[in-house]
Image (cartoon, rainbow, N blue to C red):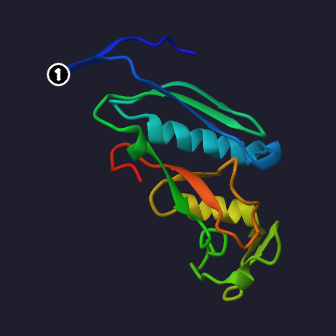
Amino acid sequence: MEECRIRRTPHAVYQITYHFVWIPRYRKIVLPGQIAERLNQLLYTIADQPEFEVLALEVQPDHDHLFVSAPPTYALAQKVEYVDSRSTSQRCVACGHIAKENRRSQSVFLCAACGHTALADVNAAIVSDAPTTNVAVTEATGAAPGISQPLKRLVVDSVTEKFV
């Protein structure tokens, strides 16, 4: 882990660090191999901006850690926000069709419109990533995928744009 150093701007001297931890419900292993590598790439892309500094990033099969330094011009609420992702788990990555019928079970996604088949969590992660380079990870206290109650996702958005 890099040393937390004091940083300066024309109007401030600061040492602000944020430690984000994403844990799937029941510490279920949801980030095997390629998914973990892609998440690692995306987190570095998002946080690798001139005013932000990634101090540490660790992607484990059952949880993730991101330790980042950010200037005081960004509020924590701007960096991380909960959004409703009911349609994310029901939207087809191939054609964009949204329907409850697309989510056949907790693990299977089959588009009723175009016939695209994928693992449900992989499809939802790609859909979440596609529009604005977001990284979406299931919140630890959220409902399990496939349950009708709204599932919340923790979204970290690009730091050059406004944080969602």
Residue at horizontal 67 percent and vertical 86 percent from the top: 114
Q: Is residue 53 above or below residue 109?
A: above
Q: Which residue is mark 1?
A: 11
Could one spot residue 28 in this view of the protein?
no
Instruction: Give how far across and how far down residue 69 sits, in percent.
Output: 43, 25
Find residue 151 and report its horizontal and vertical position in percent: 65, 63
* Direction from residue 45 to residue 63 in the image, left or right: right
Residue 125 lies, with reference to residue 110, above or below; the image says: above
Q: Residue at x 62, y 70 (%)?
A: 86
Answer above or below: position of 52 versus 88: above
Query: Which amino acid, by three-letter code, is at mark 1?
Result: His
Q: Position of residue 106 (x, y in %)?
A: 81, 68
The quarter holding residue 8 reads top left
Category of crowding for the residue at label 1, using alpha-carbon neighbours closer than 10 angstroms: few (below 14), some (14–19), many (at least 20): few
Q: Quadrant of the C terminus?
A: bottom left
Quarter assignment of residue 71: top left
Q: Is residue 28 left or right of residue 93?
A: right
122 sits left or right of 13 in the view: right
- Place of residue 18 in the rendered image (x, y in percent of width and height, measured from the top left): 49, 29
Residue visible at 72% across and 38% down in the picture: 63
Q: Is residue 57 left or right of residue 143?
A: left
Residue 88 visible here: yes
Residue visible at 40% across and 22% down in the picture: 16
| Local secondary structure at mark 1 | loop
- Badge count: 1
- As drawn, the residue found furthest toward the left would be 10
Quadrant where the N terminus is found in the figure: top right
